[in-house]
Structure formats: structure tokens, C-alpha cells
Image: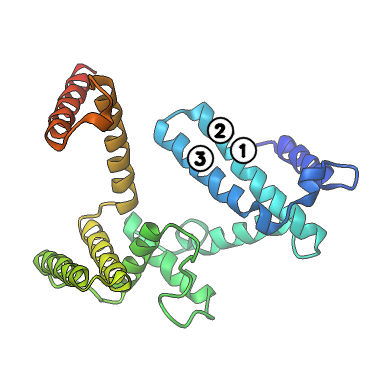
Amino acid sequence: MEVKELKALIEVIAKLRAPDGCPWDREQTHMTLRPNMLEEAYEAVDAIDSGDLLNLREELGDVLLQVLLHSQIADEEGAFNIEDVAKELKEKLIHRHPHVFGKAKVNSADDVIVNWDKLKQEEKTYRKSIMDGISKSQAALMSAQKISKKAVKVGFEWGDVDSLYDCIKSEFEEFKEAVKENNKEHMEDEFGDILFATVNLARWYKIDAEQALLRANKKFIRRFKKMEELATKPLEEYNLEEYDKLWRSAKKAIESENAQL
């Protein structure tokens, strides 16, 4: 596989950051580019979800741009360069795949994950808690899933799913008590406990909570847009009973459309 285009791209990035390059690119720092990294990653995920491979190619290019810009800035600061990034990643992949590059044996993808976690722990000896290493910047729902999975790895788990359901119910009751107190901080704490317990329920059934919520969001948006199409007057003029009827009609219309696909 040739990488001449990749090398040419690295040269383009260096030129953009050069004294005679682009004023905008020259002003960027790791912190100013931070939101761009998040935005481009989410847009790449949207392309994956859509199944549009041409769009995915473009969005992956935008993600790569962020990697190269950060590497170029670090190079200028004397910290590291893109070669260092590639070398470290290569060595990590080789070390964490001894069943491919060494003599280790695995029987399933689950075995690979177990080995990966063990090798990762060996590499990062500075981490004292199993909870160390969880990103402080990722979405709260994703973070909750990771925290839950880490706790389960050391046996911190409900005895059965019924006890998990009971836990969720008790969290709702505690939230109701906080509401009675009219204490916003207490309400926020208890509502957070509801969400965290629900994330554990998703994990129990091997459901990705983030994807589940994204699907719910998309479903709601589609139904709401269908309501707007079916409405015979401004939505602001609908009462609750009319809203319920319109919502049901929108749901039925979408089900009919899906059946015709």
C-alpha cells in the first residue's frame, strides 16, 4: 500500500502552519481545536450510521485533519510529531495482540478483550484505581457505561436482574422524596442515580445505552415531524387530548410507511 498521499497531506498541514501559511491555521492551539475534534468525530459517527461510505470517507478525512493538526502543533513545540504518534500506536497494537504477533492463544473475541484489559493494566502501572483512565470529557451516558463495566469486572454486580429492577424502582421513590423537599440539588442527585441505574440495566442486557437513546431521539423527531405534516392547525392551538390523537396518528402513519418499504 502506497502512502504518498498521506505524506503529501502531512506536508500540506506543515505549509498551512508555516509563517507564510494560513492565518487561521497558524493561530490554532490544542485547546482551540478541541471542539473541532469532538464535532468531526460525531460527524464521522453520523456517516457510519447513515451507511453512506462516500460521506464516511470525507468525514474520516476531517478526523485525520484534526490528528495531523495536533501532531503538527506538538512538533512545533518540540513535544512529538506524527511519526511518534504512529510508532506508539503500532507498538501498542502489537503488544496488545500477542495472539497475532506472538504465541498467545485465544478462542474467542471475549478472550481478546480479557487479554487486552490485562495488558493495558500492565502498561499503565501508574493507575491505582480501576476507575482511573475514564475520560472526563466524554458524554455522561458513555462514561456511565464505562464506569459500570469497570465495576463489574471486579465482581461489583447485582445478584440478578430482579434486584436491578428493584434498585431502579427505589431510585424513583427517592427522587419523588427529593421533589417533595423541593430541593433542586437533591433532585439532581437522585435523578442522576435513576439514569445510572438504568444504564446498568442496559448493560445487563448487552444494550448500548448511547445508541438506544440516539434511536429514541431519532424516533421522536420523525414522529414529531409527521405530527407537523398531519396537523390541521398550528400545534400551539392543540390541547392535550388533540395532541395525543395527533401523536397516535403520526405513529400509525410512520408504521404504514415502514411496512411499505
Q: Where is 196 relative to 253, above or below?
A: below
Single out the residue that lies furthest toward the front.
237
Q: How far apart are marks 2 and 1 (CA)?
A: 6 Å
Q: Position of residue 46 (x, y in %)?
A: 45, 37
Coloration mode: rainbow
Count neighbours of disc 2 (C-alpha within 10 A) and say few if under 14, some if 14 to 19, many if 20 or more: few
Q: In the figure, 43 relative to 178: above or below? A: above
Viewer-proximal residue among 225 and 168: 225
Residue 232 image offset from top left, x and y in percent: 22, 19
Mark 3 element type: helix
Could you tell me if the residues under marks 2 and 1 are in contact, i.e. CB atoms within 8 Å? yes
The residue type indicated by label 2 comes to Arg
Foreground: 49 or 93? 49
Where residue 252 appears, as percent x and y from the top left, is: 15, 25
User: What percent of the width, then of the height, locates residue 185?
Assistant: 33, 72
Residue type at tag 3: Ala
